Image: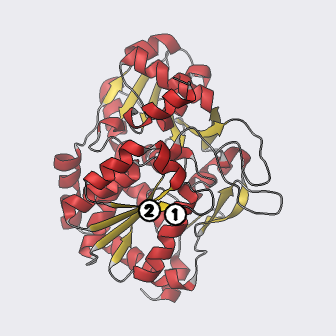
């Protein structure tokens, strides 16, 4: 695909999305887009990917009827258990897909960014399994609060590169990975972990993650004989939310609720927002190659974000989610740190499931606002995007234990 053809076909979601990148990145993005489209139309590729998802990753994941949580909320609540996927989170759905594309393209090296470490671990897993040299960019702040996942990445053979610029969190890890890719794309694939960035990443990540929603739809129809009244998922960049939402977008009666990180509240200083709620508090702007909703100051400078959950500590959101929230198909809601911590404890004690702090935002919001799930007796699905053992130190420090 020529650069001009690629620029012409770059996907947009309403006014969001597009291609706002340096000229040095147009060629690798065009190459990736062409390869992805070709391979997704290949039955042999789909069969190989489906085999890896089943036999290596452990799909399908269960849709679990949470009977104690259901009694508490007076709704029939089901949990989509992405925490049970190999690696402990939904991230492997995307890394397997992208790494297989990269292998077919002849790439020998993977680079990735990570915040909470789950995407980094998932990239390290596929790097080891499929034979790639693997390097993961991670903010210095996140390295400190996610030490266990840093060790897991290194154990799996990946090099973890500390990012000390800017906020020293996810946004700047992505910046450094993009700089690397611009200089090394001939042998390197940048394995972006969320449904954000320039085309084709938002569509590609959504497509690889949509296995979550396809399974959930089949499972709820089998369990209840009808679709749910609502689906709730946490949102940082949007990979787990788009993964479960996408197969239900045309099912208008199903309410889709995206819960962002409210952090300490709606406030901000000159450089830092007290939250990671781009849909709730952001304005239109360009971040990592796409027009989307971004936390920014009155002069358009991107703010540093904040959340107790490292995976939601991002000042933007995927362009498709920005569009879906603007059109009203997705309802954007906010849960602060304290709500997330309460959700973390509640699911642990009520169901024996320790959720990732990211997922705990969705659980905590549902506990405080059960009306968002539907009326009494209605069917609700909550996506548990990952497991919470990675967050035990963070929670203990938050509670001064």
Image coordinates for residue 44, horizontal then vertical, percent: 18, 66
Q: Residue furthest right?
A: 298
Check whether the beta carbons of the residues at disc 2 and disc 1 lie within 8 A of each other. Answer: yes
Quadrant of the image occupied by residue 130 = bottom left
The residue sitting at 52% across, 84% down in the picture is 24
User: Crowding at label 1, few (<14), some or many (≥20) Cα neighbours within 10 Å?
Assistant: many
Residue found at x 33% / y 64%: 98
- Picture coordinates of residue 195 (x, y %)? 49, 57
Residue marked by disc 1:
174
Residue 84: percent from the left, percent from the top? 29, 36
Gap in Å between the C-alphas at discs 2 and 1? 8 Å
Residue 137 seen in render: yes
Q: Is residue 98 left or right of residue 169?
A: left
Label 2 sits on a secondary structure element that is: loop
| Label located before the other in sequence (2 or 1) | 1
Whether residue 197 appears in this view of the structure is no
The residue carrying pointer 2 sits among few (fewer than 14), some (14 to 19) or many (20 or more) residues within 10 Å by Cα, namely many
Q: Which residue is mark 2?
A: 192
Q: Point out which mark residue 87 bears.
A: none
């Amino acid at each position: 695909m020529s650069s001009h053809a690629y620029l012409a076909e770059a996907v947009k979601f309403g006014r969001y999305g597009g291609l706002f990148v340096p000229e040095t990145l147009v060629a690798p993005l065009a190459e990736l887009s062409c390869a992805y489209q070709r391979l997704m139309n290949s039955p042999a590729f789909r069969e190989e990917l489906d085999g890896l998802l089943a036999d290596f990753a452990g799909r399908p994941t269960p849709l679990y009827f949470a009977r104690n949580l259901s009694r508490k909320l007076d709704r029939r609540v089901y949990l989509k258990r992405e925490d049970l996927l190999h690696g402990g989170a939904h991230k492997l759905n995307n890394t397997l897909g992208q790494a297989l594309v990269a292998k077919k393209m002849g790439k020998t090296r993977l680079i990735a960014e990570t915040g909470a470490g789950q995407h980094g671990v998932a990239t390290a897993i596929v790097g080891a399994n499929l034979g790639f040299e693997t390097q993961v960019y991670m903010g210095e702040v996140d390295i400190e609060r996610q030490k266990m996942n840093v060790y897991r990445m290194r154990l799996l053979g990946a090099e973890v590169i500390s990012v000390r610029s800017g906020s020293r969190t996810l946004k700047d890890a992505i910046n450094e990975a993009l700089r690397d890719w611009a200089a090394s794309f001939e042998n390197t694939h940048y394995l972006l972990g969320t449904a954000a960035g320039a085309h084709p990443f938002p569509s590609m990540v959504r497509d690889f993650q949509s296995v979550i929603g396809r399974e959930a739809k089949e499972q709820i129809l089998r369990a209840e004989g009808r679709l749910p009244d609502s689906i709730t998922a946490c949102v940082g960049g949007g990979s787990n939310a788009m993964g479960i939402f996408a197969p239900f977008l045309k099912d208008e009666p199903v309410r889709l609720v995206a819960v962002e990180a409210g952090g300490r509240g709606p406030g901000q200083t000159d450089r830092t927002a007290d939250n990671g709620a781009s849909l709730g508090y952001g304005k239109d702007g360009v971040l990592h190659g796409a027009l989307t909703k971004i936390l920014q100051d009155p002069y358009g400078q991107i703010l540093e974000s904040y959340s107790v959950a490292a995976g939601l500590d991002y000042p933007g959101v995927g362009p498709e989610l920005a569009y879906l929230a603007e059109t009203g198909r997705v309802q954007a809601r906010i849960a602060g740190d304290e709500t997330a911590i309460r959700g973390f404890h509640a699911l642990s004690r009520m169901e024996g499931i320790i959720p990732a702090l990211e997922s705990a935002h969705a659980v905590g919001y549902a506990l405080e606002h059960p009306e968002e799930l539907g009326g009494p007796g209605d069917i609700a699905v909550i996506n548990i995007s990952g497991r919470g053992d990675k967050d035990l130190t963070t929670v203990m420090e938050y509670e001064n234990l």
